[in-house]
Amino acid sequence: MRLVPPLFSRLICIKNNSNRKTMILPILAYGDTILRKKTKSLSKDYPKLDVLLDNMFETMYAAKGIGLAAPQVGLPVRLFIVNATPFEDDEDLTEAEREFASTFVQVFINAKMVEETGDEWAFNEGCLSIPDIREEVFRQRTITIEYYDEKFVKHKETIDGIVARIVQHEFDHIQGILFTDKLSALKKRLIKGRLADITKGKVEVDYKMRFPKVKKKC
Ligand code: CO
């Protein structure tokens, strides 16, 4: 998920404490079949998970993202990361929500959505795989989710508001769902041309991407 523009400048980078060299990965654009693939669960012995996570955080921060899912970097596995910290200054949120978001940086492995409750509310969502398109998406306010963290410790958490929103968007990615799937038929028709342009790389973007209809240079 991508940050709302006014918050760009407030993005906080969390440094990793290791000396490993990280790599910015290309983000797959709308139309890539990997974004729609069935994802596999991760086992404890998944090779170089620590390196992958460092790279995913680096990639997310470089793209000013607030969430990134493994399929977006070409891996159809049940993994995503969330960084809600830029919302600590968002004046549209309640103080409790700002406080909660201010420290929320989390790895979600093999997440399972236990429950979604509460009224649906609209939020203007964007996605690193769908540059330049933002639309109001309706989702329920509160979620209960089960997942493992990077140390394979199991968690079961109930989250609401803006953090739940980011988690719902990223969780959708590991289900092969994109936010544009949730729009009305009319809205879908209106953005069809722009989505087709994205698949061809006809979009301005300030981070590293790979487009399905652009041939790779040898
Ligand atoms: Co997204």
Image (tube, rainbow, N blue to C red):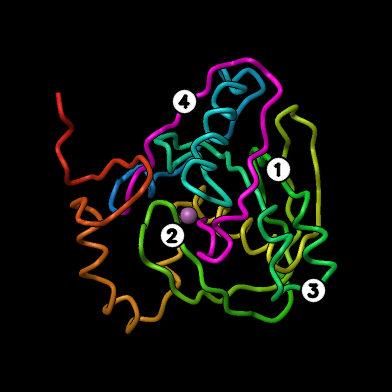
Residue kind at label 1, given as amino acid type: Gln
Badge 1 density bin: few <14, some 14–19, many ≥20, Cα 10 Å: some
- Residue range of the region highlighted in magenta in the rendering: 1-30
Q: Residue at x 19, y 56 (%)?
A: 202
The residue sitting at 26% across, 78% down in the picture is 189
Assign the C terminus to one quadrant of the image.
Answer: top left
* Residue 168 relative to residue 105: left or right: left
Give whichever of discs 3 and 1 has the lower sequence position: 3
Q: Which labelled disc corresponds to residue 59?
A: none
**Mark 1 and mark 4: span between their CA atoms?**
19 Å
Assess whether residue 7 is covered by the magenta stretch: yes
Is the Cβ of the residue at disc 1 closer than 8 Å to that at disc 2?
A: no
Query: Magenta stretch: dominant SS?
Result: loop
- 197 in the magenta segment: no
Whichever of callouts 1 and 4 sits on the residue coming sooner in the sequence is 4
Q: What residue is disc 4 on? A: 23
Position in image of residue 197 (x %, y %): 20, 60
Q: Is mark 1 within 8 Å of ligand 1?
A: no
Report the Cα–Cα distance between label 1 and label 2.
21 Å
- First reached walking from the N terminus: tag 2 or tag 4: 4
Q: Secondary structure at mark 4?
A: loop
Residue identified by numbered label 3: 94
Residue projecting furthest to the front: 9
Query: Mark 4: few, some, or many residues within 10 Å (few <14, many ≥20)?
Result: some
* Residue ID for mark 2: 178
Eye-nearest disc, 2 or 4: 4
Mark 3 belongs to which amino acid? Thr
Which element carries disc 3, helix, strand or loop?
loop
Circle nearer the viewer, 3 or 1: 3
Give the CA separation, mark 3 to mark 1.
21 Å
